């Protein structure tokens, strides 16, 4: 009886509602307005959250969360709401490629941000080309750009960009004889090739070009040989403990020869350190790393200061360079979503013609032949003095 009674009331209510609607007395008269479901687009992210690059990956994830909130709270009502879906790459290339596939097929993402690791980025880029989905990588291995991949962009700095800035500084100080020390891995090879290729154009002569294995940390023979051959500058391209090993070897020999490092430097490196070995080291960093060295009122730095303050307020720490790359990638994609019926093809095309795009990292000048667009002035050259980061001067003193 109860079921029949409920069924009766359902039918009666439906009939009554229909009668009221026909009579013009339906719900709008009582203030009821049925809202249309809000338009939503999915933007994917592939980041190392549990692997060897997890600390940096979490910075990138937090930057994306911050940008997602910022965009959705300030967007125009005609623009679709962005829903961020992040998949952990675990720092593995195969997992990163599978994540891109899932975001494209299962989640229907219009674009993907990441990954930040070199090997992951290459695997993800290949899958993005296959799936024809825009990928804005947070790493910039040369293989992404040579040959150019139609669906792949990057907001990170290329090795050639960092080398160009360091070489400009070397020449501005009157030096022209250099010695190169690089690791025998993918990163070291890329840096070594860039250092070797750009040296003649910069008017520099390479007196020694040595690559070392991951087990080699005694650089005294290298420094002695380079010094005897008349090298005026050492350029080191790698990451990890080898940087400090080189700095300590230079200190042990009491050499006054300047040492330039690659961009893979932690914010804490040498900052506040009392160690004499890191004194004088020079290295390029992304703008967000060095924002504290510039005035908050400077027009070119105001937005970076605001982002840094928002990040610190929400997550309790200052953002690193990868966070800046991630924020720029999200903003680039979000800007391309403006307009009706955003599709993967339209997003790809809008990114390609968005030049100039002013981001936290610098001004990007994308084109059909350049899917990175960053120039050397998008980096800041740092020199450690008295245990603190300072802006490197452009003349010999």
Image (spheres, rainbow, N blue to C red):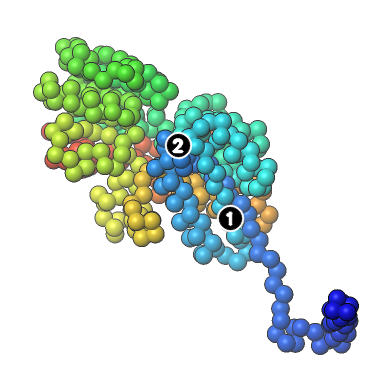
Locate residue 7, reporting x and y percent: 87, 77
- Counting labels gives 2
Q: Is 88 displayed left or right of 299 in the figure?
A: right
Left or right of 114 in this view: 183: left
The mark found on residue 83 in the picture is 1
Q: Is any part of residue 186 visible from this angle? A: yes
Q: Nearer the viewer, residue 11 or 140?
A: 11
Q: Nearer the viewer, residue 194 or 114?
A: 114
Question: Which of the image's four quarters has the C terminus?
Answer: top left
Residue carrying label 2: 51
**What percent of the width, then of the height, locates residue 371?**
52, 36
SS class of the residue under badge 2? loop
Say whether marks 2 and 1 touch (CB < 8 Å). no
**Picture quadrant of residue 238:** top left
Specify the quadrant of the image occupied by residue 339.
bottom right
Q: Crowding near pointer 1: few (<14 within 10 Å), some, many (20+)? A: some
Q: Residue at x 32, y 25 (%)?
A: 237
The reply to whether residue 22 is visible in this rendering is: no
Residue 377 sits above or below residue 62 on the image: above
Pointer 2 local density, CA inside 10 Å: few below 14, some 14–19, many at least 20: some
**Above or below, comparing residue 177 to residue 12 in the picture:** above
List x then y, in percent, for residue 340: 67, 57
Secondary-structure class at tag 1: strand
Q: Nearer the viewer, residue 147 or 62?
A: 62
**In whole angstroms, how far apart are the C-alphas of marks 2 and 1?**
25 Å
């Amino acid at each position: 009886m109860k079921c029949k009674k409920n069924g009766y009331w359902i039918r009666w209510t439906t009939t009554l509602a229909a009668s009221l609607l026909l009579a013009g007395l339906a719900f709008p008269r009582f203030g009821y307005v049925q809202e249309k479901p809000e338009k939503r687009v999915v933007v994917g992210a592939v980041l190392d959250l549990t692997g060897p690059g997890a600390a940096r990956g979490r910075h990138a994830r937090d930057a994306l969360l911050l940008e997602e909130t910022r965009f959705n709270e300030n967007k125009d009502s005609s623009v679709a709401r962005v829903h961020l879906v992040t998949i952990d790459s675990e720092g593995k290339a195969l997992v990163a490629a599978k994540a891109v596939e899932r975001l494209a097929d299962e989640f229907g993402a219009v674009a993907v941000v990441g990954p930040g690791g070199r090997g992951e980025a290459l695997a993800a880029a290949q899958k993005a080309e296959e799936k024809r989905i825009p990928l804005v990588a947070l790493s910039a291995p040369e293989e992404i750009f040579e040959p150019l991949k139609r669906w792949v962009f990057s907001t990170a700095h290329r090795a050639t960009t960092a080398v160009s800035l360091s070489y400009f500084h070397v020449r501005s100080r009157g030096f022209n004889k250099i010695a190169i020390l690089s690791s025998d891995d993918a990163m070291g090879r890329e840096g070594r090739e860039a250092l070797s290729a750009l040296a003649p154009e910069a008017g520099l002569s390479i007196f020694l070009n040595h690559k070392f294995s991951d087990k080699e940390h005694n650089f005294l023979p290298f420094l002695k040989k380079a010094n005897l051959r008349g090298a005026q500058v050492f350029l080191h391209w790698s990451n990890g403990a080898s940087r400090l090993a080189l700095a300590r070897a230079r200190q042990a020999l009491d050499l006054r020869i300047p040492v330039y490092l690659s961009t893979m430097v932690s914010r804490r490196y040498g900052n506040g350190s009392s160690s004499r070995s890191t004194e004088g080291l020079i290295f390029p960093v992304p703008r967000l790393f060095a924002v504290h060295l510039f005035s908050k009122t400077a027009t070119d730095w105001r937005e970076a200061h605001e982002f840094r303050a928002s990040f610190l307020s929400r997550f309790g720490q200052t953002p690193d360079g990868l966070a800046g790359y991630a924020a720029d990638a999200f903003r680039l994609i979000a800007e391309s979503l403006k307009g009706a019926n955003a599709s993967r093809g339209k997003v790809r095309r809008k990114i390609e013609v968005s030049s100039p795009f002013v981001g936290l990292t610098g001004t990007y000048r994308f084109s059909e032949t350049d899917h990175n667009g960053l120039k050397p002035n998008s980096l800041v050259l740092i020199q450690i003095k008295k245990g603190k980061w300072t802006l490197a001067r452009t003349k010999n003193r």
